Image (cartoon, rainbow, N blue to C red):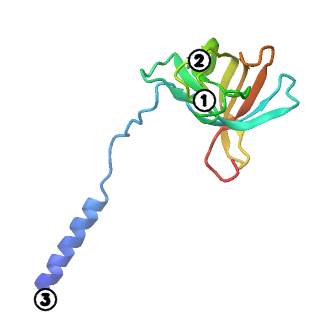
Amino acid sequence: MKQMKYILSLLLVTLALTACNTYSEDFDIEYSSIHPMGGMYRINITDETGATTLSNNFCYLANTVDNSVTQAWIRIGAYNANPASGWAINGKISVDLNILSFSGSGIENLAGNVTSSSNTFSVTDGQVKLKGATAPSGTTSDAISFTFTNSRFPGKTYKAEGYRYTGWEGD
């Protein structure tokens, strides 16, 4: 019986020592090439006056296949978003990670999940502001804003403003 207590005590001490394993180094998290700009944003799209909301949708900024630090994909809505909608854009834009800005003109619009298109769009004044917005849940989030045009609707300008989607209920 004494041997059993000795073995059990030794087992518990061994378990306690292995369970308290600490790591002396921080592990690096590999972000996408356009970090911290990349992500999913909840945006309101308004007309050029800012008075009429045309859509409340998601905007995605994503890295390119070659992990460029000067280009990113921008998409509003789903891959198969109706390209006839003025706000439906999908294409590569230029990014400046130093000042968290983005823009582009005459970009092939691949909205509707097409492989090529004669339609184009332009993005101006694109800006991401870290911790610059408060989501409806009350969570501090990153802000996004930009102006864009779509060649399907000449002369129309759209404004997009929003926040990085947090995943919390209500956001």
Left or right: 79 with respect to 50? left
Instruction: Assign a secondary structure to mark 2.
Output: loop
The residue at the point 61 percent across, 20 percent down is 109
Picture disc at residue 112: 1
Point out the frontmost of discs 2 and 3: 2
Decide: few, some or many residues near mark 3? Use Cα within 10 Å; few <14, some 14-19, many ≥20.
few
Q: Considering only vertical position in the picture, is 132 above or below 153?
A: below
Task: Provide the residue designation for mark 3.
Answer: 1
The residue at the point 61 percent across, 48 percent down is 167
Please provide percent x and percent y for residue 116.
54, 18
Please provide percent x and percent y for residue 24.
32, 43
Decide: few, some or many residues near mark 1? Use Cα within 10 Å; few <14, some 14-19, many ≥20.
some
Relative to the observer, which residue lies in front, 133 or 60?
60
- Amino acid type indicated by mark 3: Met
- Amino acid type indicated by mark 1: Gly
Instruction: Assign a secondary structure to mark 1.
Output: loop
Labels 2 and 1 touching (C-beta < 8 A): yes
Relative to the observer, which residue lies in front, 108 or 117?
117
- Amino acid type indicated by mark 2: Ser
Left or right: 104 with respect to 6? right
Instruction: Assign a secondary structure to mark 3.
Output: loop
Task: Provide the residue designation for mark 2.
Answer: 117
Labels 2 and 3 touching (C-beta < 8 A): no
The CA distance from mark 1 to mark 3 is 75 Å
Residue 87 occupies quadrant: top right
The mark that comes first in sequence, 2 or 1, is: 1
Q: Considering only vertical position in the picture, is 137 above or below 19?
A: above
